[in-house]
Image: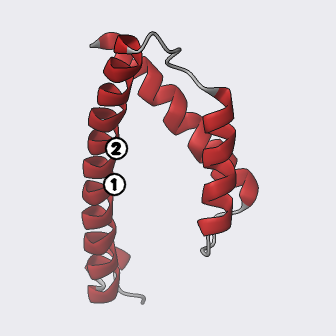
């Protein structure tokens, strides 16, 4: 009979590493919100539109070139779109 998967030491360690990674990701998203909030404030002072489609397109291209992992271009586009939408919603709440 196979061992209970949740008791497997390697699986437990991988799950711990994943949880640590997710906490780091959360910290990065919160830091991103702080930085974008500062950008939004500065743009308001300069009377510049907050949303910049050209900058968003540049960012996607920049990230595509920087991506050397398993994330596909389509996955990257979905991730960035979700992140940008979330950022805009969160900043609108504050």
Quadrant for the N terminus, please: bottom left
Residue at left offset 61%, top offset 36%:
55
Q: Position of residue 78 (x, y in %)?
A: 65, 43
Please tell me whether residue 90 is drawn above or below residue 7 in the rendered image: above
Quadrant where the C terminus sits is top left
**Callout 1: few (<14), some (14-19), or many (20+) C-alpha neighbours within 10 Å?**
few
- In this image, 76 relative to 88: left or right? right
Res. 55 mark = none
Which structural element holds mark 2? helix
Q: Which residue is mark 2?
A: 29
Could you tell me residue 36's position as x and y percent? Answer: 37, 32
> Dot 2, crowdedness within 10 Å: few (<14), some or many (≥20)?
some
Residue pictured at 69% horizontal, 53% vertical: 61
Which of the numbered marks, if any, corresponds to residue 25?
A: 1
* Residue situated in front as seen by the camera: 22 or 45: 45
Answer whether labels 1 and 2 touch (C-beta < 8 Å). yes
Q: Nearer the viewer, residue 84 or 14?
A: 84
């Amino acid at each position: 009979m196979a061992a209970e998967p949740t008791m497997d030491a390697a699986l437990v360690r991988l799950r711990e590493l994943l949880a640590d990674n997710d906490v780091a990701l959360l910290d990065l998203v919160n830091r991103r919100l702080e930085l974008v909030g500062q950008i939004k404030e500065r743009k308001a002072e300069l009377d510049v539109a907050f949303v910049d489609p050209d900058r968003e397109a540049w960012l996607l291209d920049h990230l595509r070139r920087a991506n050397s992992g398993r994330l596909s271009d389509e996955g990257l586009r979905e991730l960035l779109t979700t992140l940008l939408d979330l950022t805009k919603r969160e900043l609108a709440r504050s």
